[in-house]
């Protein structure tokens, strides 16, 4: 194994670990979502208890708050689903980078993580530069015998 190939192999492992850490942060953020929901519900309930002045030309504030309630369910559901999908995709990309398997999945995941500015952008661009280097491509083409041995034992 040449010195350059060894360098790319180490960079892929570091990128894989960083992707897994990023996925951990994303999935950890999902744990804060129910806490945020409870806080938002308490704020909405406190607004219902306030005696707002009524004006003839304006809508009732209590009615506006009650109208917003269903959209909160949709928003939190969307955020949770998006967090699960993004965290899962980032985790799968990190595992594949670390094992040097499924190069296409790694390219798609690295490009998608660029949306998460600024950490994801830096990590995604750096990983894409590694993945598209001609000297790093053979690392994905070679059979990964160690991974197969680990799976069987």
Image (cartoon, rainbow, N blue to C red):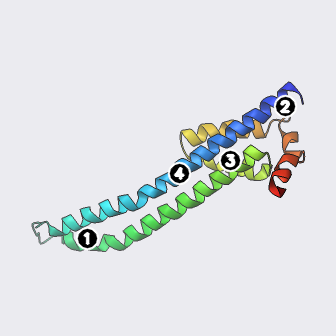
User: Which of the 4 quarters of the picture holds residue 153?
Assistant: bottom right
Asked whether, in this view, residue 89 is left or right of residue 140, the answer is: left
Q: CA distance from mark 3 to mark 4?
A: 13 Å
Q: CA distance from mark 2 to mark 3?
A: 19 Å
Where's the N terminus, which quadrant? Answer: top right
Residue matched to label 3: 94
The label shown at residue 5 is 2
Asked whether, in this view, residue 91 is left or right of residue 62, the answer is: right
Check whether the beta carbons of the residues at disc 1 and disc 3 lie within 8 A of each other.
no
Q: Is residue 67 visible?
A: yes
Q: Is residue 144 visible?
A: no
Asked whether, in this view, residue 144 is left or right of residue 118, the answer is: right
Q: Earlier in the sequence, mark 1 or mark 3?
A: 1
User: Which of the 4 quarters of the picture holds residue 130?
Assistant: top right
Tell me which residue sits at (19%, 64%) in the image. Answer: 46
Q: Earlier in the sequence, mark 4 or mark 1?
A: 4
Check whether the beta carbons of the residues at disc 4 and disc 1 lie within 8 A of each other.
no
User: Which of the 4 quarters of the picture holds residue 131?
Assistant: top right
Residue 151 point in image, percent of width and height:
81, 56
Residue matched to label 1: 64
Q: CA distance from mark 4 to mark 1?
A: 33 Å
Asked whether, in this view, residue 77 is left or right of residue 143, the answer is: left
Local packing at callout 3 (Cα closer than 10 Å; few below 14, some 14-19, many 20+) is many
Tell me which residue sits at (31%, 61%) in the image. Answer: 40
Check whether the beta carbons of the residues at disc 3 and disc 4 lie within 8 A of each other.
no
Question: In what element is the residue under mark 2?
Answer: helix
Task: Tell which tag, 1 or 2, sits nearer the viewer.
Answer: 2
Check whether the beta carbons of the residues at disc 2 and disc 4 lie within 8 A of each other.
no
The label shown at residue 26 is 4
Tell me which residue sits at (30%, 60%) in the image. Answer: 39
């Amino acid at each position: 194994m040449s010195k350059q190939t060894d360098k790319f192999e180490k960079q892929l492992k570091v990128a894989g670990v960083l992707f897994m850490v990023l996925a951990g942060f994303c999935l950890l953020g999902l744990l804060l979502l129910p806490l945020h929901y409870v806080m938002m519900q308490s704020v909405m309930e406190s607004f219902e208890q306030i005696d707002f002045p009524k004006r003839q030309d304006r809508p009732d504030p209590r009615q506006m708050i009650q109208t917003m309630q269903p959209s909160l369910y949709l928003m939190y559901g969307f955020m949770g689903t998006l967090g699960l999908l993004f965290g899962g995709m980032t985790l799968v990309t990190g595992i594949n980078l670390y094992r040097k398997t499924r190069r296409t999945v790694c390219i798609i995941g690295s490009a998608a993580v660029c949306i998460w500015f600024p950490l994801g952008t830096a990590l995604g661009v750096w990983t894409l530069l590694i993945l598209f280097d001609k000297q790093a491509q053979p690392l994905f083409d070679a059979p990964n015998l160690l991974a197969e041995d680990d799976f069987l034992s």
